[in-house]
Amino acid sequence: MSIIKMLQCVFLGLVQGFTEPIPISSSGHILILKQLLNFDMLNDINFEIIVNFGSFLGIIFLFRKEIIKIITDFFKYIKTKEKTYKENYNYAWLIVIGTIPAGIFGILLKDKIDAISNNVKLVGIALLITACALFLIKDIKGKKEKNEITYFDAIIIGLFQVIALFPGISRSGATVVGAMLRDLKRKTAVNYSFMLYLPISVATMILGVKDLINTPNISGLLIPYLLALITSCIITYFSAKWFINIMKKGKLGYFSLYCLIVGILVILFL
């Protein structure tokens, strides 16, 4: 593969890594790039799996200590029933419950979503919806801590994640909006949003492994795939940290304005 193709892979890995954690829709931006750029990798489903895996690794690394503690406390509580471990035991179940709606509707609506997945005008409309939603919750501070999230909260936030199955709707944006409407504190909301991302990402990768393994000439794609994965991983890590700081400061209005501008431009010109 040429140097130009490799640079294209790095660029797309950068776009994926930057847009995945923040509420502007990574899938929407990839579709916009398909309309603007003639990159072969933009039509490669395996490449999409690879860069998504890079984002997954970036989030895992960022939250590695919290994830390990949630998992270990979950099993320790099962074994000992000590109250010390109960908070993370409950939190683990909240992650599971919050993931279920997207899992169910993802299966039920797969064909319909696939049918509209390349409609860039719908991405523009979805960005406008995201802009409005972020604007509505930008000043909400919330009161609930991690240990105050209820199962009903998890279901509602999970249903917001379902909306993000449609192209152009940001997954992180949808879950953060849902969490803020359920009165979660900003930091609690963004952390829970990232926790909900992990199971969905794992499921997506598992479903795509077969296609990846059966890819012809896979050996010739290893280097560009690896470059894209590493780029996506590193950029996702820093983009997620940046978004967490933005959330703490309550500056979601910036993302709202961005989605508004891009949404209008997409509808008018693409």
Image (spheres, rainbow, N blue to C red):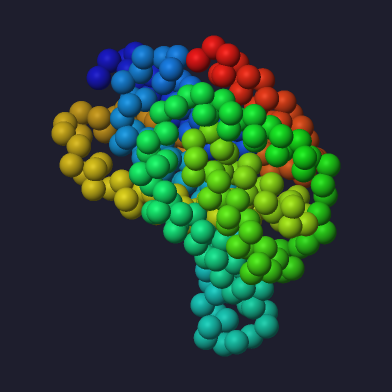
Answer yes or no: is residue 156 visible: yes
Answer yes or no: is residue 246 visible: no
Q: How many marks?
A: 0
Dividing the image into 4 quarters, which one contains the N terminus? top left
Left or right: 261, with 218 as reference point: right
Residue 237 in which image quadrant: top right
Residue 169 in which image quadrant: top right
Please provide percent x and percent y for residue 138.
Answer: 79, 40
Please provide percent x and percent y for residue 242.
Answer: 67, 37
**92 above or below 197?**
below
Of 11 and 98, nearer the camera is: 98
Q: What residue is rendered at 35% in x and 44% in y?
A: 111
**73 above or below 176?**
below
Left or right: 76, with 225 as reference point: right
Please provide percent x and percent y for residue 121.
Answer: 51, 24
Q: What residue is rendered at 43% in x and 17% in y?
A: 35
Q: What residue is rendered at 70% in x and 39% in y?
A: 133
View extreme (left): residue: 216
Please provide percent x and percent y for residue 236.
Answer: 54, 37
Of 212 and 9, nearer the camera is: 212
